[in-house]
Amino acid sequence: MTDSILLKEIQEQPDVVNKLFATENKKVAEIVKSVRGSFEYILIAARGSSDNAARYAQYLFGTHNQLPVALATPSLFTIYRQAPHLNGALVIGISQSGQSPDIVQVISEARKQNRPTISITNAADSPLARASDHVIEMHAGVENATAASKTYMASLTALAMLSAHFIGGAEYLSQIQQLPEKISETIANINTQVDKVDRYRYMEHCAVIGRGLNYATAFEIALKIKELTRIVAEPYSSADFRHGPIAMVREGFPVMVISPTGEVSGDVKELVVELLRRKSELLMISDDQQLLNRAHLAFPISSGIPEWLSPLIAILPGQIFAYYLARAKGLDPDHPQGIQKVTETF
């Protein structure tokens, strides 16, 4: 089914990253120069997949830039009409459409409070972009599939570029430029495994586990599974999972584990041992062949990716798994029932 809209957009992601970097890198450098020294922490307003990109930012800016990142509570700005004081904040809005009124309201209030604002959006003429001091355009092209794929990838890329410029090291920018090749390589690797996805067509629930930088990946993969297949998919960190939810695991219980090589690998490996002891059905996303060998379904990702960029690679198996699982269940992954492309919340 090569004419699928969603599958086509998943395959476009190497080009999206390449175009975004080539087009916006100079602008991001100028934005960083403009806001540097004017804030003490970052506040991000987002919903849906964009909110998962914000979770990535919490670990990205924390580990790379020693900057605390808070997630905004838009209802305070709209429903409760009690906007908090934003002293010391750099406020970032992330939205593929740039149309959600609550996200726009957070940015508008930040400007009223004379705080610097940045929007990351695929629509440079959107209300969010117009409300912001600075705009980083995703350059993802029109995303026709209901479920976000390439705009999520673009959001992560834009955040990675901001972080790299705040560091000021050419090495980090060079690592971002290597991503398109690694993304293409990973997609090719995953495509060799898709005929095994049919095994899970009767699955009704699962857990998705990540930690650290890939905590966000667990949330985004779980969201894609829920959106496309109607399966109850619950995301957890490997730490939180041990604090109660692990009681769900019994023989045959499906658990997808995201474990690229990095600082949290040891912790995740310990959890994998426990999951196998409990005879769970293990789906593994990793570049570690030993872990992949222990899985019932293994999704190999490209090796040699620095951990701070691994979420841009680790998301790919989840996108493709959710797509083919929807197909196996007789559902339309391009137009899943019950959701729409642009959701406006207040």
Image: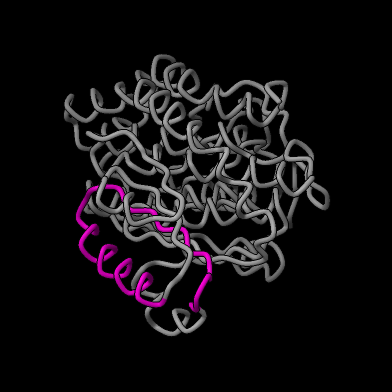
- Of residues 20 and 315, the one drawn nearer to the viewer in this rendering: 315
Q: Residue at x 56, y 44 (%)?
A: 321
Q: In the shown orientation, is residue 1 left or right of residue 89?
A: right
Quarter occupied by residue 86 = bottom left
Q: Quadrant of the C terminus?
A: bottom right
Q: Nearer the viewer, residue 341 or 268?
A: 268
On screen, residue 229 above or below 98: below
Relative to residue 252, is residue 173 depicted above or below? above
Q: Residue 251 placed where, x, y %?
A: 50, 75
Q: Report the quarter where the N terminus lies.
A: top right
Residue at image coords 40%, 38%: 312
Q: Residue at x 44, y 85 (%)?
A: 244
Query: Residue 134 location in percent, x, y?
Result: 48, 32
Q: Which residues are magenta?
A: 249-278
Tell me which corner region of the image, top left, top right, bottom left or bottom right, holds residue 12.
Answer: top right
Residue 267 counted in the magenta span: yes
Q: Residue furthest right?
A: 337
Asked if residue 203 is positioned above or below residue 65 in the image, the reply reads: below
Nearer the observer, 219 or 258:
258
Please tell me which residue is depicted at 62% across the width and 55% down the height of the picture: 200
